[in-house]
Image (cartoon, rainbow, N blue to C red):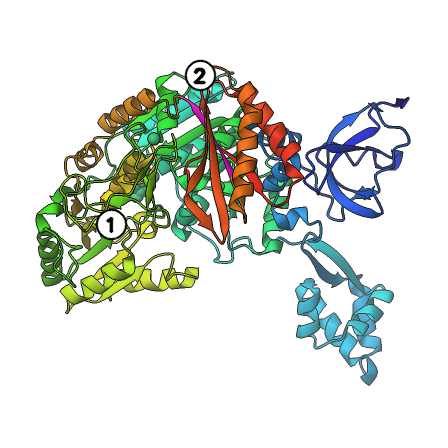
Amino acid sequence: MSTNPENLTVARVAIDLALDRTFDYLLPPEWRDELGIGSQVQVPFGNSRRHGFILDLSAESARPALKPILGPVPNRIRLPEKLIELGRWIADYYLCTQEQAIRALLPGAVRSGRIRPGMERFCRLGEREAAERYLLEHADDARAAGRLRVLKQLLVAAELPYETLLAEANATPAMLATLEKHGLLIQEKRRRDRALFPEGAVLRSEPLPPTPEQAAALAIFDELLESSDPSRVLLLHGVTNSGKTEVYLQAIARTLERGQGAIMLVPEIALTPQTVRRFRARFGDELSVLHSQLTDAERFDQWDRIRRGESRIVIGARSALFAPLARPGLIIVDEEHESTYKQTEAPRYHARDVAVMRGRLEGAVVILGSATPAAETSYNVECGKYRLAEMRSKVENRLDPVIRVVDQRLAGPPEPGKSNYFSRILIEAVHDRLRRGEQSILFLNRRGYARVMLCDHCGFEARCPDCAVTYTYSRQRQTLACHLCGNVIAAPVVCPQCGAPDIRYAGVGTEKIEAAAMALFREARVGRMDSDTMRHPADYERVLDQFRRGELDILIGTQMIAKGLHFPNVTLVGLVNADLGLAMPDFRAPERVFQLITQVAGRAGRGDLRGEVIIQTRNPDNETIQFAARQDFAGFRQFDLEIRKLLNYPPYSHLIAVHFRGPEEAAVLARASRLVEELRPYCHEGIQLTGPEPAPIERIKGKFRYLVLLRGSALRQARRRLRELLLHDHRTDSDVEVYADVDALALL
Ligand code: ADP
Ligand code: ZN
């Protein structure tokens, strides 16, 4: 063991190779002031030179003859120490390598080390008298004409950007260089942030006098801000238009007054120009917005601006959570129930949960806002871990829409060659709108990736008797399988409930619905919007604009149109197939359907006209649909939590899904089985280890997929073992890919 006499001269560096280990390097004296924990550095590695991050400093190393760090990367990135700590937690909790966690913390543009701060060259006059003298002396010198033009420009403007000066004076760089040599012109490089807010200034707005409900919420916030509890989380449960955003704005203002910064996460789709304008109106240019359309250079500048403390408020989608604010005092997660907060690539973190963890590490208050809070969040309120503020009344007294549930079975089986996607009631309602010149939205719930066996006639769904989830249908094998417990039965050819011969698996697309609507409503102008037709944000905007301008009567779409759009002339929303969501093989299906119906209902009647919502279903008595139709969130949540408790699902247990995939089924299965055997000794009583099972989508792109599920309330030990297995033992074999999804939201 070599011990260095001077303290902390060994740097533990995580190298960008996803090895989940650090390497020791010597921190040379000349870099000791500048480099520390969080610095991105260049190090020699084998015969090459690589980038890495210093995760730790130490006084000694177990290895002899350490190589020295070569220096910082060119743009001198340094992550705040708290973020390094957060990254460590992510790697540990979400079972990924430290490098993967660090990658999540940093925009690629920043991590690459290639982008430098935006710089602009400015020119100003040297000594004024000298310039004037030069002008006089060279007045008749034709060769100096260009130089004279430059000086004249500068005499008027005092200072100009380099490029502007060249253009305005019709000058060449050589002319400027000559003037500089004579001391008549001075060049300066200055920092310039790229594209802050190209759309220009915004009128300032003042805080609104809070309503009683807002005041109550802010009082709890103030209390949390003053408290020294390590965990300070507030659930702001308020219906749409109850004034949640105004509460966010005022909470942020109070945080700034204390000299701290704030981060607000919103789902990407909600990061609209309106939202940004509202925040800019309150906070001006202290705001940074991180959205997916930024160029690398813009992203870099925003990141660096935040790190330098020039903007203390950050709004953005998921990854804004890792904004390098030095002292965040508040982290807001708006629409905290949104599943888009769960990252689908490694590290598969949930931004809401990481926000709570960052809040704890930084001593910041966390506000989770939603009209339909997630079960996990409601549960944490119930347990007394989170505080609760409820906002039940709308600020502007808008009428709630009328919600009707329509039994689609009454429509009978479809005649050959015809569709019966629309009930008579829905058809009539649309005709009504067409006559009155109002607009309709027909909404298709298409989270139907999984195949579900469904009877068109009686509404029967094939379900596992042991698990209360739907069976997954395999066409290839003609089986129904439960991916939770492993039950497998032969797929029926007639409906086991009513004997109808046309039992089939569900799967209706927006395309078919559009064709059916066009056939039914011949005079109507119909538009369609879904992720298949919308490849570019521009397509999306175009259809929305058409609809907004009233050039379309009916808009057909999927989840995409359920969120946050304002259309005052829409008075009817039809949810064509509410069942498809319910039939998903997933214990979260009822929650999603409730959220969806709530969101969809929010689209109807946002102007002065009262809206109507028609929910078509083959299960009109289904509890979720009933609760949603009454908009009884408390009732639904209690019902949903009771079932989850009974079946030991989250939030009553933790759930880790381990995915296996590869080109050869036998190899995938063998690998999964081996992992189960290796893991079993670490699963004490109370932990359920199930599988391997074919995943609900059994094959993607020619790769077979298997699932192993780990469920229990105390998973610590099993998780630690699983982490070792995944990141060390199981990484050598390249034929089968293995990864874990901790707190999995979807089991597909
Ligand atoms: P939410 O975020 O819950 O949907 P908002 O904060 O956007 O609600 O508020 C809805 C509307 O009510 C907005 O137009 C907002 O300007 C207005 N509003 C919010 N709070 C107040 C208040 N205290 N006084 C007057 N108007 C308010
Ligand atoms: Zn089962």
| Residue 85: % across, % down | 63, 28
Q: What residue appears at the point 15 percent right and 56 percent down from the top-left corner?
A: 420
Q: What residue appears at the point 36 percent right and 31 percent down from the top-left corner?
A: 374
Horizontal side of 46 relative to 733 (left or right) equals right
| Residue 733: % across, % down | 65, 41
Q: Is residue 388 above or below residue 273?
A: above
- Give the secondary structure at mark 1: strand
Ligand 1's image quarter is top left
Is 656 covered by the magenta stretch? Answer: yes
Q: What residue appears at the point 76 percent right and 46 percent down from the top-left corner?
A: 73
Q: Which residue is mark 2?
A: 686
Q: Which residue is mark 1?
A: 504
Foreground residue among 546 and 157: 546
Query: Label 2, label 1: how many angstroms apart (C-alpha)?
Result: 38 Å
Horizontal side of 154 relative to 395 (left or right) equals right
For the C terminus, which image quadrant?
Answer: top left
**CA neighbours of label 1 inside 10 A, class few (<14), some (14 to 19), many (20+):** some
Horizontal side of 472 relative to 300 (left or right) equals left
Occupied quadrant, residue 59:
top right
In this rendering, which labeled residue sits more in front, label 2 or label 1? 1
For the record, the magenta segment spans 653-659
| Residue 626: % across, % down | 17, 34
Amino acid at the residue labelled 2: Gly
Most frequent secondary structure within the magenta stretch: strand
